Image: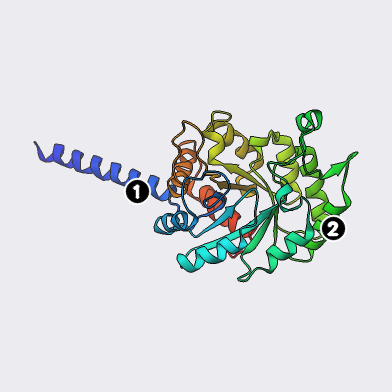
Amino acid sequence: MTGRARLNVTVGALGAALLLGAAAQAQDIRGAIDIHVHQAPDSVKRSADADDVARRAKAAGIRGLVMKNHWEPTASLAYMVRKAVPGIEVFGGIALNRSVGGINIEAVRRMVAVQGGYGRVVWLPTYDNDTPAKRADGTPFVAVSKDGALLPEVIELLDFMGQNPRLTLETGHVSPPEGLMVVRAAKARGVTHLVITHAMVLGWTVAQMQEAAREGAYIEFVYLGALNGRLTFKDYADAIRQVGPEHVILATDLGGVPPNTNYPLEAQGFQLCLEEMHKLGFSLAELNLMAKTNPALALGLEPK
């Protein structure tokens, strides 16, 4: 091999290494916060225990997690996981489904008062949301509105949350029109941390997401939604470009064990999510905004 040939090979290898380094940097989950994680113990099967989820996340350099359960509060779980796995910021919350009494402000108060103060998130009804199908077949549900107006107990909840600035309100699985009503009313009552829960999974249009963003809500895009065949990463990328990364949070929604599906665990899934977004043209700055800065702000934390 001639000297010029050796030089070309060396320069080519160096260029490839630099490109790989840039890609790795753009996909770096160190410092990220996943605001949507499911874990055992639960009343349905989950892929890993809460302490194992936290250990894997910590080992990957993830800054924090919000542990979600559709049927019981997770503030106490967050407290115990922090003791078992120090060095990672773990938070809990409460989903206002039938198992906790629906729109139950007393349940929220008790969740907030749990030792440690790690109960931060309130989700409006998820699996017990109001749908035409449930109304038609008589399946019980938790209503948040009637005749185009939010119910009094929802207004009471928003007033309480407006007086507790550490709390984050998420829209859960309510319909997009209801979610927009909630966002407007919450903003008017001083609620400062608002998130539209996996908006595209629930059929939010770009125009609806843009409106929620103008009202100060973050729009959540979850990795799971692009794994189950209902949406694609390109769908996500196109919507994020129109909404604006400054209004978007990337999360995983991992932890479930769907039939015949081998989904990754949370830390690996978060990494893969960022890799997919990077392939679709999102920069390091945009990925950091959506995976690190915006989740921190949505939880009332200082970005790092």
Q: Position of residue 244 (x, y in %)?
A: 63, 43
Q: Residue pushed farthest left? A: 1
Where's the N terminus, which quadrant? top left
**N-terminal-most mark, 2 or 1:** 1
Label total for image: 2
- Please give the residue where the numbered disc 2 appears in the rendered image: 156
Q: Nearer the viewer, residue 86 or 69?
A: 69
Residue lying at 39% horizontally and 45% vertically, measured from the top left:
23
Q: x and y percent of residue 294 in the render? A: 60, 54
Q: Amino acid at mark 2?
A: Glu
Question: Observer-nearest residue: 99 or 264?
Answer: 99
Q: Position of residue 272 (x, y in %)?
A: 44, 42
Residue 282 is left or right of residue 55, and the answer is: right
Q: Is residue 16 above or below residue 101?
A: above
- Residue at left 24%, top 40%? 12
User: Looking at the image, which is closer to me, 33 or 143?
Assistant: 143
| 43 vs 104: above or below | above
Q: Residue at x 65, y 49 (%)?
A: 71
Residue 53, percent from left and from top: 46, 54
Q: Which residue is mark 1?
A: 21
Residue 166 in sight in this render? no
